[in-house]
Amino acid sequence: MQTSLVLTIEDIKKLATECSLDVVGVTSADSFDDVRQIYLERYAKGYFGEMRWITPERINLGCSPQDMLPGARSILVFAYSYLRDSNVPNENDGVIRGRVARYALGEDYHYFLKEKIELFLDKLKVITGKDFASRISVDSGPVIDRAVAARAGVGWYGKNTNILIPGYGSWVLLGTALVDIDLPLSSHIRKSCGSCTRCISACPTGALVAPGVLDSRRCISYLTIELKGPIPRDLRPLIGDWIFGCDICQEVCPVNIKGKKPNHPEFSDLPGWGHRPDLVSLMRMTEDEFRNKFRRSPVKRTKRRGLLRNVAVALGNSGDRRAVPVLVEALSDHEPLVRGHAAWALGRLGGSEAKYALESRLQIEEDSYVREEIQLALDEIEV
């Protein structure tokens, strides 16, 4: 790497590689007025659901780099691929299994991706000889990282709303850094999804209401991660066996099929987790076990009650009555959210054992929400 103040975009790309970052792009710190209008319209339609941190004020700030970092001149955007080879268990091993989004198989990217970007900026300061100001965001600040990535030319918006990057697809995590120095800008990319609509057709809940438009309230990732209360009853059967996130719209994408697999070590499967975890074992997880297992994982975001809520739904959708005993146990869980979804799952699986357990629990259940779930399950149960 040259030690001159005159940098090229190739110098910046080389530096990113040295810091184990897969892709880097640079755009100006001009405001994102077009993105601002789109986001405000979708906010008005309620498409962000209960993600209460997404407000008009936050949208305006995220589209105004100068307000986030006074004197900002450039924005760097980084992509880090989480695609890797993973051990897939034998589907005929007799275990009732769920599915997990690939990015959530290992460590929480908020930790290590920020560290990599900090290293990049430290090296950039040495190269330029400038102690410039910066502001880093790894999916935790108001920066709309996909808008930055699109304008920086590292990829294009897919119809599933994800950024598609040549060679990597959308199997990437994004981070940004605002800086108050001028940097060479990336070239724009001239690609699109063309007439392909596979992601829209494949979404089981119909969350992609138009090309590039997501109604989060119907998205499986939102329902299993961001939604904190009960999952709407009409959407539960459509979730299938997903217990944390969803990859369907990415799995069917032709661009993603040929994505590189860097096999970054941070995404190695946690013990007993992986793509297809054992649902019965997860359903019996205690608070301490949850905290210990997922303390550095994105899964901690759901808390134990959220994950077990999702597991109960997946067990109900399994159609396998071997799940009834563990769901009966869950009717006594200390969390009403878990008890309510276990009741729904028992009603869906049916059978005399499930019916007896629901009737027995109804006699002693004091929570009004759970009582309603039990009664609805009993109304629908088949023996």
Image (cartoon, helix red, strand yellow):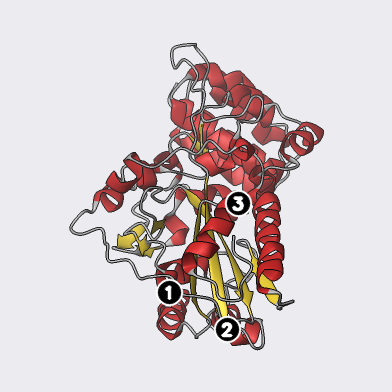
Task: Name the image quarter holding the N terminus.
Answer: bottom right
Name the residue beneath numbered marker 1.
42
Residue 185 spot, x, y in % from top left: 46, 74
Residue that badge 2 annotates: 73
Instruction: Give the label, 1 or 2, closer to the camera.
Output: 2
User: In x, y percent, where is residue 214?
Assistant: 39, 62
**Callout 2 secondary element:** loop
Mark 3 sits on what residue?
Answer: 18
What residue is shown at x 58% (from left), y 41% (from top)? 104
Query: In 3D space, how far apart are the residues under numbered discs 3 and 1 (Cα atoms)?
Result: 39 Å
**Sequence-wise, which precedes: disc 2 or disc 3?**
3
Q: What element carries label 1?
A: helix
- Nearest-to-viewer mark from 3 and 1: 3
- Type of amino acid under label 1: Arg
Relative to residue 373, is residue 1 depicted above or below?
below
Residue 63 location, x and y as percent? 52, 81
Please report whichever mark, 1 or 2, sits nearer to the chain's N-terminal start: 1
